[in-house]
Amino acid sequence: MKANYLLILLGFCCLFVLGNEASATHVRAGEITTRRISNTSLTYEITATLYFDEGGGRMASEQENDIDMCFGDGSPIAQVRRSFRGNINRNTTINIYRTTHTFPGPGTYNIITIITNRNDNTRNIPNSVNTTFELRTTIVVSAPLGLNSTPVMLNPPLDSARVGQKFCHNPAAFDSDGDSLAYRLTTPAGRQGWDVTCRPTQFVAGYQRPEVIGGSPTTETGNAPATLTIDPRTGDLCWDAPAEKGQYNVAFIIEEYRDGIKVGEIVRDMQIVVVEGTNRRPELRVPDDLCVEAGTIINQAITATDPDGNRLQLSAFGGPFNVGPDGRPYTDPTNNQPINIIAPPFATFNPRPDQTLNSPATGTFRWQTACAHVREEPYDVVIRAVDLPARGQTQLATLESFRIRVYAPRPQNLTARPGTGRATILTWSAYACGVPGAEMVIYRREGCTTLATPPCSTGIGATAGYTEIGRVPITATTFTDTDPSLRRGASYSYRLVAAFPRPRGGESVVSNEACLALPLQVPLMTNVTVDSTDATRGRITVRWTRPIGLGATDVGGPFQYRLFRAPGLTATAGNDFVQIAVIDADLSGTRADTVYVDRGLNTSGGGYRYRVEFYYTEAGTGALTRLDVTDAASSVVLAAAGELRRVRLSWSANVPWDNTNQRHRVYRSVSGPNGPFNRIAEVAVQGPNTFTFTDTGSDSFAGDGVQTLTLSPDSVYCYRVETVGVYTNPAVSLRPQNELLNYSQAVCASPIDTTRPCPPRLSLDSLDCSSLRGEAACNQTSFSNTLNWQAATGGNQPCDTRIASYNVYYARYEEDTEHQRLTGVPAPTTTFQHTSLTSVAGCYYVTAVTRGGLESAPSNRVCKDICPVFELPNVFTPNGDGKNDVFVPLPCPAGVVSVQFVVYNRFGGKVFETSDVNINWSGRTSGGQELSAGLYYYQASVRFGGVSRNGSVQVYKGWVQLMRESNAK
């Protein structure tokens, strides 16, 4: 279980300077950590660990009995009581505040605490004594995470450095859940004044990064500007190099990740005191990062040297230990109970941390690793070397870290043997690490193979070709592979990997291989070859072996083969196998009983699959009983597609033998699908994606005569492919040779040509407006347009003159950008009559289409408009005699869409108005009053519906004589 409290030892003397330079008022450093404590509720234990300045703020430290804490879930501010107060040294105390809180549901929560004042005289925080000290920890609350907790930090956030000398610090963060950690710098949080709110923390106003303070600060070597960095992987915080003495605060974030997903982060705010002096820090040499199998004993020497010849003290801390840098067991300061952050056995380090050594000094790190230490993330070990200078000089320390990854041991003694039917039984030795929740993962691939396993390489890589087929508890020692897709005649390789449960995770090195060929006690399919290609009279020859490995006395006869066929290369709904033949079997080999010619097929389609069932006679009952069934084998299906001056072929088959890593044969015919065929190439195929060939007309096989061609789009070329395959099982020996040869069906295709035809030249019959006048035109409701065009030669532009047809396009209005295709006109016809039109108005263009289906650009666009006709009489007699009683346009208006007609008397007064296209004025006012005979004036605004979508408007003005009965006589 993960401890969520600071693991320190009371009395541990940190290297924090104790002199007057550190005199201040209140908080120096701290962080907030959390630990989920319930599997049934979202309850967390939350701990704030704070370090107080005793030199100038003892009273404040003593009186800080509780602090305010916000949980980020909308609950009220909590008063968290202090659970422990103790001395780090005479100038610093540690206060621990602990509470529990249950969050309302899953989510991401920011836990915040704000302390009234920082300590005084912090160089890079203006007015630090009046600036709040604010901490934030973000957690992802989620039931699936289980008892997740933030990492703990085993090194207090207080340290000292010397002017002009590189300084490094490591928080020694350890996550016992095995989550991965990442580090990044941030700005300390705080604000001027104080208010009790749960508002988000804010960065300190005016904060300066410490490496920019002091004129023009440089690195220790003096050849570059000073830097402050943190290693995102190890957490090594280095300042190279301080330029001026004083106390400084820096902050960094420790992010926690599980399976690549961020599950929380901690902000740690720490204080560094820089002093002047001539003392130089020690030099420390630690081992390189290590990777060991659980159960390995690690013995590593650590060497420290002091450049000033001072005596040294060495100490170590980190995840593998159960003691702190002072050599005392880790305890919970709130109850003084010992705690272990990992399972025993624990690492040890000699000499003791209080032992003084001459320079150079040597220490020994020793750790007996165990199964309980397996995890995906490495352990960090931090070594500290402290010098003991002469009186008046400040002690300096050097920290270096190295990482240890402990991986699970390799599963041992994996074996494979045949089971019942097609089953394979795997067994192995009891696993050495029986960690609860761990599993043994079983992997399989076809074909036996060696597998390189570099040191510290765990699991099995995706490129090895293995597929996970099962998992069993880590205590299991056997697994039966009953996959029905296992193929007779094939060899299968099995391997094991032990997988440890999350969150710690971790895998073992892959086991050695166990390889097994399935027993051959049934026939094997050897051929499904297409003899002829036809939609109804196609023929396929199917062959298989007699039962391989079946002894003469193993089963009794008579024997029988039953042949089944199914359409397609793979099984789908509705294409099940049906029996097509029953053949009496003779195991002596004197009869041709393992071949069948399947006739009357559509071999130009998508292929067929075949399988054979073998039957024997059961002793006693005499019943024919099925012993087993072969793996299905399909015919080879070839596809051809025309490309630019070439034809691309691709083929596939679903067979129990291996067609890869062979040389397949490609044949071409210029006489049709029934040949004769000439072999033109041998294709070196590898995986299924390489079953392709592009015919450019060449012929690279001279054995049957070279027939190199220039492929023409006007010609059709036919192809078939002969695949070559073998069974990978060394126990399969076929005569007269092991190669399995199968032909595909024949397919035909033509190459394409991207040369487009030139656009034709279009003309449209002219409009005879005179034909639209008179009584005869009034009854015309259907119109037609006649198009004529000429094929263009293109001049200097290359054009394909092999025109197959022409496309005619039409749009009703000249503003239309989209034209509809009316029809295709086969060449050499170059005319088209567009009939059944309600108006002659419209626009046309024509394109040419080659035999290969390439279409030219549009021809010139030709539009036809209407003949607008609208005439009015100059007299009418509304006297009720049925003759000329209504004022209407003369026969017959053409193309009129709308009319706005107004009548005025001789004084200019409007007497009648209508929008009736036919006007139909009866000699009355718009109100229905009869008008007297006389002369009236009119204006007609007429809109015609021609080729323009909005039409054209013409205004007609004139007079009309209205005559009644008396003056009509």
Image (cartoon, grey):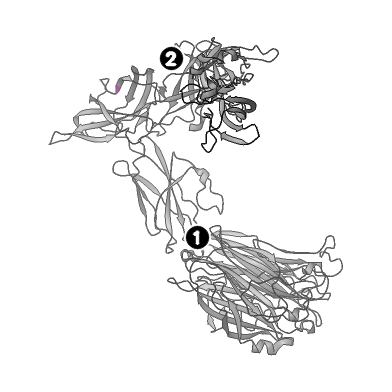
Q: Which residue is mark 2?
A: 673
* Residue type for callout 2: Pro
Q: Position of residue 461 (x, y in %)?
A: 52, 47
* Badge 2: residue crowd in 10 Å (few <14, some 14–19, many ≥20): many
Task: Give me the residue at 78% from left, 84% from top.
Answer: 19
Residue furthest out toward the front: 966
Comparing 73 with 498, the one in front is 73
Residue furthest out toward the left: 620
Residue 89 makes an appearance in the image: yes
* Residue type for callout 1: Gly
Q: Position of residue 801 (x, y in %)?
A: 60, 12
Residue 285 makes an appearance in the image: no
Q: Is residue 868 left or right of residue 26?
A: left
In the image, residue 36 above or below residue 936:
below
Q: Is residue 207 left or right of residue 474?
A: right
Determine the secondary structure under disc 2. Answer: loop
In the image, residue 621 above or below residue 242:
above
Comparing 848 with 581, the one in front is 848
In the image, residue 710 above or below residue 252:
above
Q: Position of residue 330 (x, y in %)?
A: 57, 78
Q: Position of residue 604 (x, y in %)?
A: 39, 21
* Badge 1: residue crowd in 10 Å (few <14, some 14–19, many ≥20): some
Q: Which residue is mark 1?
A: 505
Of callouts 1 and 2, which one flags the residue occurring earlier in the amino acid sequence?
1
The boundaries of the magenta stretch are 588-595
- Circles 1 and 2: CB atoms closer than 8 Å: no
Determine the secondary structure under disc 1. Answer: loop
Comparing 194 with 126, the one in front is 194
